[in-house]
């Protein structure tokens, strides 16, 4: 899965089919997807790209998410399963019970699955986006 995020104006209402929509935000999102497909952002694989009018923001957020994606690409199926359950019931004991695992195993799967880094990336990136665009 690739995620392209574009910032800008959207003329009119947003309605299906979205692949026919225009405006700055959608054009920027398409550019972001194309940069992922062309592997033009970095010398490493990425899943996410951002495009806006703010070049410094683009470089910063794309580096953050490039590093984030490097971690995401290393998460195993078992670690994803633990993360999904933890998101449903965000305590070690409840997650362990639902997965029939020891709480220490759940903790280890979250740590090795980069859960804490990934959630912190989302928090900090969200704050950066609000500061720039809101």
Image (tube, grey):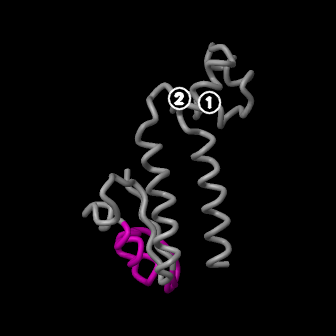
Q: Residue furthest front?
A: 43
Task: Single out the residue that lies furthest toward the left.
Answer: 38
Q: Secondary structure at mark 1?
A: helix
Per the rendering, the mark at residue 81 is 2
* Towards the viewer: 67 or 4: 67
Q: Are marks 1 and 2 in contact (CB under 8 Å)?
A: yes
| Secondary structure under the numbered disc 2 in the rendered image | helix
What is the number of the mark on residue 85? 1
Mark 2 nearby-residue class (10 Å; few <14, some 14–19, many ≥20): some
Q: Which residues are magenta?
A: 8-32
Position in image of residue 68 (x %, y %): 49, 51
Which image quarter holds the C terminus?
A: bottom right
**With 69 as the anchor, is 35 left or right in this view?**
left
Give the crowd class for mark 1: few <14, some 14-19, many >=20 residues within 10 Å. Answer: some
The residue located at (39%, 68%) in the rendering is: 17
Q: 98 above or below 75?
A: above
The residue shown at (57%, 26%) is 109
């Amino acid at each position: 899965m690739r995620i392209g995020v574009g910032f800008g104006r959207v003329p009119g209402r947003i309605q299906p089919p979205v692949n026919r929509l225009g405006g700055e935000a959608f054009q920027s999102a398409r550019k972001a997807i194309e940069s992922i497909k062309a592997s033009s952002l970095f010398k490493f694989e990425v899943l996410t790209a951002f495009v806006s009018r703010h070049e410094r923001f683009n470089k910063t957020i794309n580096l953050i998410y490039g590093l984030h994606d490097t971690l995401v690409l290393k998460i195993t199926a078992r670690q994803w399963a633990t993360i999904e359950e933890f998101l449903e019931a965000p305590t070690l004991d409840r997650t362990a019970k639902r997965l029939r695992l020891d709480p220490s195993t759940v903790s280890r799967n979250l740590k090795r699955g980069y859960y804490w880094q990934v959630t912190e990336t989302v928090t900090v990136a969200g704050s950066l986006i609000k500061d720039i665009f809101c």
